[in-house]
Amino acid sequence: MESLSLIDSFQEFKEFKDIDRATLMNILESVFRSTIKRRYGDDDNFDFIVNVDKGDLEIWRNREIVHDGEVEDENKEISYSDAILIEPDFEIGEEVSEEVKMEDFGRRIVLSLRQNLMSKIMELEKDNIYAQYKDRVGDLITGEVYQVWKREILILDDEDNELILPKTEQISNDRFRKGDNVRAVVVRVEMKNNKPLIILSRTSPLFLERLFELEVPEIYDGLITIKNIVRAPGERAKVAVESYDDRIDPVGACVGMKGARIHGIVRELRNENIDVINYSANTELFIQRSLSPAKVTAIKLDRDKMTAEVFLKPDQVSLAIGRGGFNIKLAGKLVGYDIDVYRDVDEDDSDDVALDEFKDEIEEWVISELKSIGCDSAKSVIEQSVEELVRRTDLEIETVEDVMSILKQEFED
């Protein structure tokens, strides 16, 4: 029974483990040689025949025939009287080969053999998975949800390898159930507690880049290059693209006819708004495009400090900033500049007062918060409702009301 159990384990590993035939044979031989050494003291005179395809294993011990009474090493020598019991035609000096049966080892040793074998196979399998995925960092993976936990999701690939999608790497609108198919990108592979830990992400810019490569043949073929990607996962993303062929419109190719190409990506990202922008080495032009759909009036750059002052008509300021401030934040990350927006004041607004003039009455951090949403003057603040300012900034309602009171007092005076 022990023999059959051990042979069954060989067949199990042969059928279900991603281990090549030669490697499995070496592992089997190594495990049995160590057992033979412990039992007989030496393994030099043993032959191992492993048939991985059939799950068969044979062990043969070779001993030299010596005269009766002259046996010095029972492991390597056999007396003539014992040899002729095996085969009557044997003569002194010849070699006798005997098969070592599995049951000869005893139940305890066979169980130890099986445990040792399984341990080595599992260790090798872990190393193989680690090596396989270490080379796939950045690759797009499709798997099936196997288990959903509070902080992470366990996903199985097509070879039943375990992959982890942490909650922090999921889009806020992601909702997965067991059996769902999931697409994500491999972002990290490490060994933890002697086990490969493969981390996936759906929030990484790499994930969006791989989706574009999948949907836009020109990107996959290298005719269009993605220069940079920035994301606020689930909310908004900006993708700067450039074409090396003047005949190809990079933005049009990425969007597709009637948005056919980009719609699939937007659905995958849970309706994340994606702005595809034509890259330019001209910083002013690149900033202008990155703030789309807002129309910029003028830009002042400080290349040393990597800052940009952008001037827009009052009705364009909110477009430049975007809902939740995502548009201006992502535009700054995309071009690599800190962007501040200002209203381009007409002559009719000459009686307006810059917020910086109120530093004695309003704390500087409050002024900075208001300026971050494009409200850089007294009138631009007063024109907003208290509720709107609270929603668009991190200011408390009491703070906003105090600011409103101070600014309105200025015009009443």
Image (tube, rainbow, N blue to C red):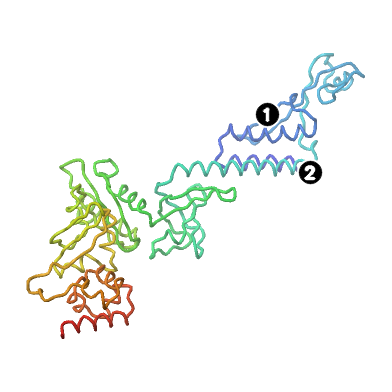
Residue 125, given in percent of the width and then of the height, sits at 57, 43
Marks 2 and 1, Cα distance to the nearest angstrom?
23 Å
Three-letter amino acid code of the residue under disc 2:
Arg
User: Where does label 1 land, which residue?
Assistant: 49
* Residue on which the image places disc 2: 108
Q: Quadrant of the C terminus?
A: bottom left
Please tell me whether residue 396 is drawn above or below residue 333 in the rendered image: below
**311 displayed left or right of 24:** left
Q: Residue furthest top?
A: 92
Element type at marker 1?
Answer: strand
- The percent coordinates of residue 379 (x first, y second) are 17, 77
Seen as rendered, the residue at the extreme bottom is 412
Work out whether 92 lies above or below 356. Answer: above
Instruction: Judge by depth and name the residue closer to the eye, 13 or 315.
Output: 315
Where's residue 394, x and y in %?
33, 73
Element type at mark 2: helix
Asked if labels 1 and 2 touch by Cβ distance under 8 angstroms, the answer is: no
Picture quadrant where residue 324 is located: bottom left
